Amino acid sequence: MYLEDKTILANVKKSVKESFIAPLLIIIFAIVLYRNPENFISVAVSIFGYGAIFIGVLDLVFYFRLNESEKLLSKHMNQGILLIAFGIIAFFENALLSEMITVLLGGYILFQNASRIGLGLYLKNKTKNAWIYVLVMALINLIIGLFVIINPFQNVQLNLYLASLLVIAEVFLIIQNILILIGIRSHDKEDK
């Protein structure tokens, strides 16, 4: 394997390990939403605001700790700035974001999985089977993200619907992370 491929796979592995936090937080949000739906959305937007600022700052710290070649492929700077901006907006426009929560969460799901499709295709020649599972789950999550944005259900059913789709999407994202790490590990063993 070329040195460039090893560097890219090492960066992918590092990025995937760092991306376990957000899905776990969203699963917790979905479970609380399911169990206590009354007035939860407004409080949740505030909590997401704090969480977004925290994760955004972490992304910026990760970005500035990378070497120059890693910065080229990193999405930490963009993601960090967007998350911090979202956190600030959450405080000043809480009511607006509460109404737009399905669009925001659907957009998050689309963003995460659009990048996973590219990653799955990149891993096609690097791993045996992990890439196909990553690709299929990313495509399923894209469909889930579209459903969350379109929101075909009434407001009464929204919380249960949203919570269920969020848990499914984020569990798939965690499984994708695990498959990518397993695929890279098996690829590293084959090279030795």
Image (cartoon, grey):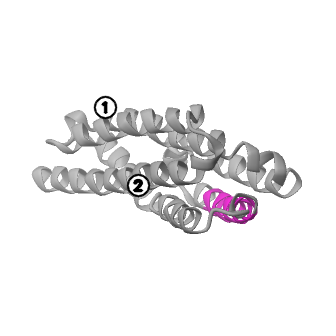
Against 134, is 189 above or below? below
Q: Quadrant of the N terminus?
A: top left
Q: Quadrant of residue 87?
A: bottom right
Against 134, is 52 above or below? below
Point 69% across, 52% down: residue: 83
* Residue 48 inside the magenta-drawn segment: yes
Q: Amino acid at mark 1?
A: Leu
| Secondary structure, magenta segment, majority class | helix
Give the residues in magenta.
43-61
For marks 2 and 1 on the same chain, the one whose residue lies earlier in the sequence: 2
Q: Amino acid at mark 2?
A: Val
Task: Measure how far apart labels 2 and 1 are at the Cα level.
Answer: 15 Å
Q: Work out whether residue 138 or residue 106 is closer to the camera in this orientation and state it.
A: 106
Which residue position is annotated with label 1? 121
- How far across and how far down the image is residue 118, in percent? 39, 32
- How far across and how far down the image is residue 70, in percent? 49, 48
Q: Quadrant of residue 144?
A: top left
Q: Which mark is residue 16?
A: 2
Residue 67 in view here: no
Question: Helix, strand or loop at disc 2?
Answer: helix
- How far across and how far down the image is residue 16, in percent? 41, 55
Crowding near the residue tagged with mark 1, few <14, some 14–19, many ≥20 C-alpha atoms within 10 Å: some
